[in-house]
Image: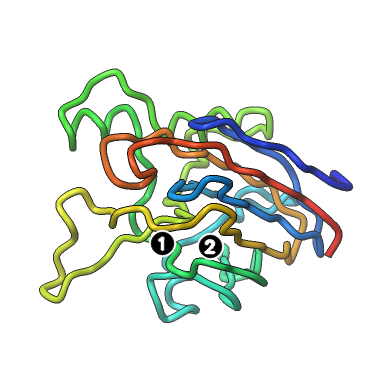
Amino acid sequence: MPDHVDVVVAAGAPWGGTVAAGQLFEIVDLEGRQGVDFLAYSAADPLERYNAPNTVKKAATLYLTTGHQLLSDVARPLLTIVEDSWGLHDTIGGCCSEPSNAALYGVAGRPGCRENLLAALEPLGLGRRDLVPNVNFFCQVPVLDDNRLLPRTFAPASSKPGDRIVLRAEMDVMIAVSNCPQVLNPATGGRPTPIRLRVSDG
C-alpha cells in the first residue's frame, strides 16, 4: 500500500491505485466544473466492490456528501466521506463512454470515462467484468418533479476552483478514477481540466 500520493491528473486522463485502511483519499477540483468518475474495490477481495443501490439506501439520498459511506455489494463500508466542500455528488448517472456518446449524442469515435476506468483497472488486475455503476464526484443529476431527468442528464457543472472531497478508507481499497473527458454533456462545463489526487495518513 502507498504511504502517500500527490499527483495532478491531466484533463481527460485516468488514475488507479491503492489506499490503505485509515488513509485519506482527497480529490481537488483545481479549476472548477470538472466531473470525476470513481470506483472502489476491496483490495483483499476485488469481488467486493462499490454498490450504488446499497450506498443510496444507506444515505437515503441520491446526492452524496460529508458523513455518507460508499458501501460494497455486501453492504460493508469501503470509504466514508469525511470532508466535502460541494455536496451534490451523483450516484445514478454512471460513466460516459465511446458507445454511449454515439448512442446519446450521435458522435462516434469519442472515448469517455468507461475507457479511462478500464485503463485504470488494468494495472490493478481488473477489467471489463469489474465495471459497475460508479460515483460521479462534482456532478449532479437532478430528478425532476415528474420523475424525468434532464435531456442531457447532468446539471450544468457548478463546482468552484479548489472544491474538494476527502474520503477515509474503511478497509484496504483499490481505486479507479477517470478525470472526465466529456464535452457533449455539462459534466465538465465543456472544457475538461486537471484534478489533484492525494493519499495521506488519516
Residue at the spot 52% in from the left edge and 36% down from the top edge: 117
- Comparing 177 with 182, the one in front is 182
Cα gap from disc 1 to disc 2, whole angstroms: 15 Å
Mark 1 or 2, nearer chain start: 2
- Residue that sits furthest to the top in the current view: 109
- Residue that sits furthest to the left in the current view: 146
- Residue of label 2: 73
**Type of amino acid under label 1:** Thr
Q: Which mark is residue 154?
A: none
**Type of amino acid under label 2:** Asp
Residue at the spot 79% in from the left edge and 43% down from the top edge: 5
Residue at the spot 23% in from the left edge and 21% down from the top edge: 108
- Viewer-nearest of discs 1 and 2: 1
- Residue of label 1: 91
What element does badge 1 sit on? loop
Residue 103 place in picture, x, y as percent: 18, 33
What element does badge 2 sit on? loop
Residue 77 place in picture, x, y as percent: 64, 69
Q: Quadrant of the N terminus?
A: top right
* In the displayed structure image, the side of residue 138 where residue 69 appears, left or right: right
